[in-house]
Amino acid sequence: MSPNNIIMNAGYVPALAALAGSAIGGLTSFVSSWSIQRSQTKIQLASEIKAKRESLYGQFIEHASSLYADALQNQQEKVANLAVLYTMINQMRLYSSPEVVEEAEKVIQIIVNTYLAPNKTFQDLREVMTNTTLLKSVNL
């Protein structure tokens, strides 16, 4: 027999087809599972980052509001408290857009300017409270 006349047993064809089908099916199952797991991991990571951001923003708002209220009534800066806000801004740099960080820095500038401004009387505070934005009361 010459090499061109190789006779293949008819029983091998279904066996090879079954092996190829099993391999393709297994590979498809693996790729599908891997893809789903990867998507779930991405979603979980995004959710964790969102939760960290929300917590950080809440803490920043709480501290900044407290310092702003203090600045309205006192002219001495609380440098240690401002350092806490700067620490929070640096943490925001990890999770937030540059625009958010820039706005947070503006809030600190407002607080500093308020500390440098004359103390507010109760009547002044009432007028500040009726303003629609924080920026109007500090003349930035």
Image (tube, grey):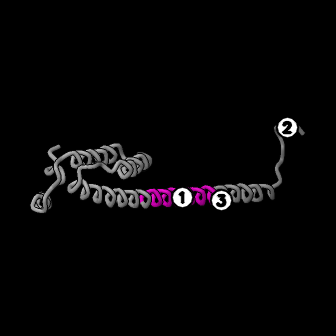
Q: Which residues are magenta?
A: 28-50
The residue at the point 85 percent across, 37 percent down is 3
Q: Secondary structure at mark 3?
A: helix
Which residue has dot 1 on it? 41
As drawn, the label of residue 25 is 3
Q: CA distance from mark 1 to mark 2?
A: 54 Å
Q: Is residue 72 left or right of residue 97?
A: left
**Near-viewer residue (35 or 73):** 73
Q: Disc 2 marks which amino acid?
A: Pro
Local crowd at mark 1 within 10 Å, few (<14), some, or many (≥20)?
few
> Looking at the image, can residue 96 be seen?
no
> Looking at the image, can residue 18 be seen?
yes
The residue at the point 21 percent across, 57 percent down is 73
Q: Position of residue 117 (x, y in %)?
A: 18, 47
Q: CA distance from mark 3 to mark 2?
A: 33 Å
Which of marks 3 and 1 precedes in the sequence? Answer: 3
> For the stretch drawn in magenta, what is the main secondary structure?
helix
Q: Secondary structure at mark 2?
A: helix
Local crowd at mark 2 within 10 Å, few (<14), some, or many (≥20)?
few
Q: Nearer the viewer, mark 3 or mark 2?
A: 3
Q: Nearer the viewer, mark 1 or mark 3?
A: 1
The residue at the point 83 percent across, 41 percent down is 5
Q: Position of residue 82 (x, y in %)?
A: 35, 49
Which residue has dot 2 on it? 3
**Near-viewer residue (39 or 61):** 61
Q: Nearer the viewer, mark 1 or mark 2?
A: 1
Screen quadrant of the N terminus = top right
Local crowd at mark 3 within 10 Å, few (<14), some, or many (≥20)?
few
